[in-house]
Amino acid sequence: MSADTVSRLIAEHLADWQAGWSMGAFGALAEFHQDDGEPAVVDDRPGLTRATARGAIRFDPAVAATLVPLAYETLSPRPQRWSHAVALCLPAADAAGAGRAVLSELGPDAAAIRPQDRAAILFDMGLALGNCDFCIRTADPALIDALRAACGRSLFDPGNPAMAAILAAHPHRVAVTRAGRAEVFQKIGGPDTGGVSPAGPHSHVLPRLLASGRTHTANTPIPPGMVPIAFLHPGNPVIGPLGEDRPFDAGLHARFQALLSRHGVPTLLAVKQQAEAALRTGDGPERFAAPDGRHERAALRVTLRQHERLAEQDGDRALLQRVRAWRTAFDAMRPADDADDTDDDAPGHAPA
């Protein structure tokens, strides 16, 4: 892979309003999203930086050239859908952040993407993440005083008032990684936002998930020794920007399949290709051996969901009947250890 491949991938998708981004870990994420036609307040394609009035993202071009892209697909809990993404990874030794386990003041945020944010004070939330320093940034004197009084303690200590102060004040959230940073300027999802995350850039800090200590969900097929630093979420052909169902978009599907063919996991691509070949030749599910491995089984089931949508779009009744027979067979054959093989594909948003 040439050194500029990932940089070009990032630059192209920064300008694509249908693509979203996230940085963080399992249980703590900062997400950057744009609306169609939303103006950029910073648009530096060579510097791999984009900001709107609601959030921002920046990749260090020198580090971006070393990132390893891994395209993959995952099952949705809703049987008619699937998710997809490109994980941007580094070797574990190169991915580690500071790993602070207590609230810590870091001083003025001189690296802030927008100039007007650089005098505000950055605090590491102390989430002890393996691949990200998850921070908050504020110029509010009252919140700064409250946070300084709590420095050196875990935000989750019983009786620590700092988290309540954060939720009330809605400071910026800043996820800092070895590859760059994502910044969220909008309010924190909660009582002030109707109990859901706002549309566009938003963040999640979920203690129950943080307790796992993972950098990513177990359904993401990251190779051993590699750690995701950021995720690109290209436009999804069946899921809209707020997690709602959308009519199947064959163009978005084809665009991601091209990414998958270039940056996918070879063993998972092989499962997809074998299933597609069997469907084309008219084989029944009884002639196809269920693959070994959780990710391989998920790849087969995602492929069948996709081909059901494609057959519906094309009006191919014979193929549709065949795909549905395969789906019935392989959805029913799930082993017990695949019980948690789906992820929420719209965390923090109201159900569609």
Image: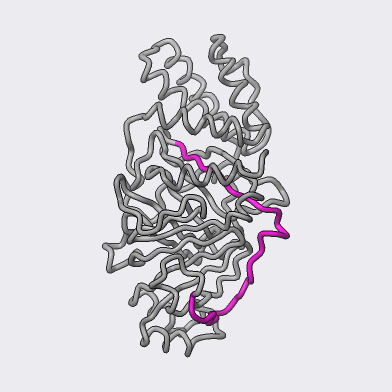
Q: Nearer the viewer, residue 247 or 181?
A: 181
Chain part drawn in magenta: 82-109
Q: Quadrant of residue 252?
A: top left
Is residue 331 in view from this perspective?
Answer: no
Judge left or right: residue 187 versus residue 254: left
Q: Quadrant of residue 40?
A: bottom left
Identify the residue shown where x is 63% and y is 38%: 294
Query: Percent position (x, y) of residue 327?
Result: 49, 25
Q: Is residue 297 above or below residue 33?
A: above
Q: Nearer the viewer, residue 40 or 279?
A: 40
Q: Give the residue drawn at x 59%, y 55%.
A: 229
Q: Is residue 351 left or right of residue 115?
A: left
Quadrant of residue 70 in the image? top right
As drawn, 18 above or below 163: above
Is residue 42 a member of the stretch shown in magenta?
A: no
Q: Which residue sits at x=40%, y=70%?
A: 172
| 105 in magenta | yes
Residue 251 visible to the viewer: yes
What residue lies at 36% left-to-right and 20% top-to-bottom? 313
User: Residue 296 appears at what percent x and percent y?
Assistant: 63, 34
Q: How far from the left and from the top, in percent, is residue 352?
A: 31, 45
